[in-house]
């Protein structure tokens, strides 16, 4: 059993305790399919700026929809296990809803996540995040700081998969 992988309601209780201790909460959402040096750098930089780092890990259906039928390479359980072994990661939760497309329903879900988790920081990368415009708007409307972390390694899961094919 992975101690870092929590249901959203369990996570909210933990966050409440951390907030009462004035801990700064950081949030990352993503796929993390084939973990690589770019992911590690991103996660480490996010953790340096927050006391508690939470990863909202996409479900397999949403990855398949956004990245293609041959993805993810590693299923949710495998991806969450690998991430749970990183010391920079405090908690992981599964992004449960399956979205046929990124539409208003999906956008509302991610907005409700921000309102529920109430992170101090939302971390992203403007080069690789397809939803950066929405994150900029939502960070302003939810009174949280959006921190863009520069890409340090010219690596992506898609590039690794292509190279291996």
Image (tube, helix red, strand yellow):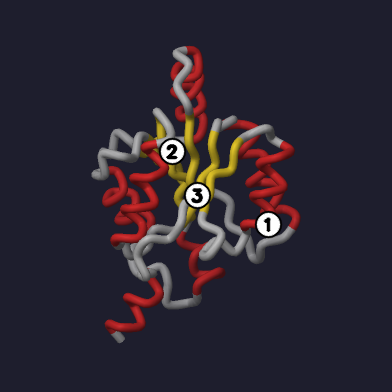
In this picture, residue 58 sits left or right of residue 142: left
Identify which residue, 160 or 45, lies in the foreground: 45
Could you say which disc has been placed on residue 29 in the image?
A: 3
Image coordinates for residue 1, horizontal then vertical, percent: 26, 38
Say which quadrant the C terminus sits in. Answer: bottom left
Identify which residue, 65 or 19, lies in the foreground: 19
Secondary element under disc 3, as helix, strand or loop, is strand
Instruction: Write down the quadrant of residue 6 in the picture.
Output: top left
Looking at the image, residue 17 lies above or below residue 108: above
Could you say which disc has been placed on residue 54 in the image?
A: 2
CA separation, marks 2 and 1? Answer: 21 Å
Image coordinates for residue 26, horizontal then vertical, percent: 48, 36
CA separation, marks 3 and 1? Answer: 15 Å
Q: Which residue is drawn at 39% across and 69% down?
A: 156
In this picture, residue 34 sits left or right of residue 149: left
Image coordinates for residue 137, horizontal then vertical, percent: 72, 47
Could you say which disc has been placed on residue 133 in the image?
A: 1
Residue situated furthest top in the rendering = 20
Q: Residue at x 58, y 43 (%)?
A: 146
């Amino acid at each position: 059993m992975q101690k870092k992988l929590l249901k959203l309601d369990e996570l909210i209780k933990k966050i409440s305790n951390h907030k009462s201790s004035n801990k700064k909460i950081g949030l990352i959402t993503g796929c993390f399919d084939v973990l690589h040096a770019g992911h590690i750098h991103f996660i480490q930089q996010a953790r340096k700026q927050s006391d508690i780092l939470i990863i909202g890990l996409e479900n397999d259906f949403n990855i398949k929809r956004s990245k293609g039928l041959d993805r993810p390479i590693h299923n949710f359980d495998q991806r969450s296990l690998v991430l749970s072994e990183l010391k920079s990661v405090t908690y992981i939760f599964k992004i449960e809803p399956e979205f046929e497309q990124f539409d208003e329903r999906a956008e509302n879900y991610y907005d409700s996540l921000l309102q529920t988790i109430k992170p101090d920081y939302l971390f992203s990368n403007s080069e690789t995040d397809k939803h950066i415009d929405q994150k900029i708007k939502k960070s302003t409307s939810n009174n949280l700081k959006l921190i863009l972390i520069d890409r340090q390694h010219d690596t992506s899961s898609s590039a690794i998969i292509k190279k291996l094919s």
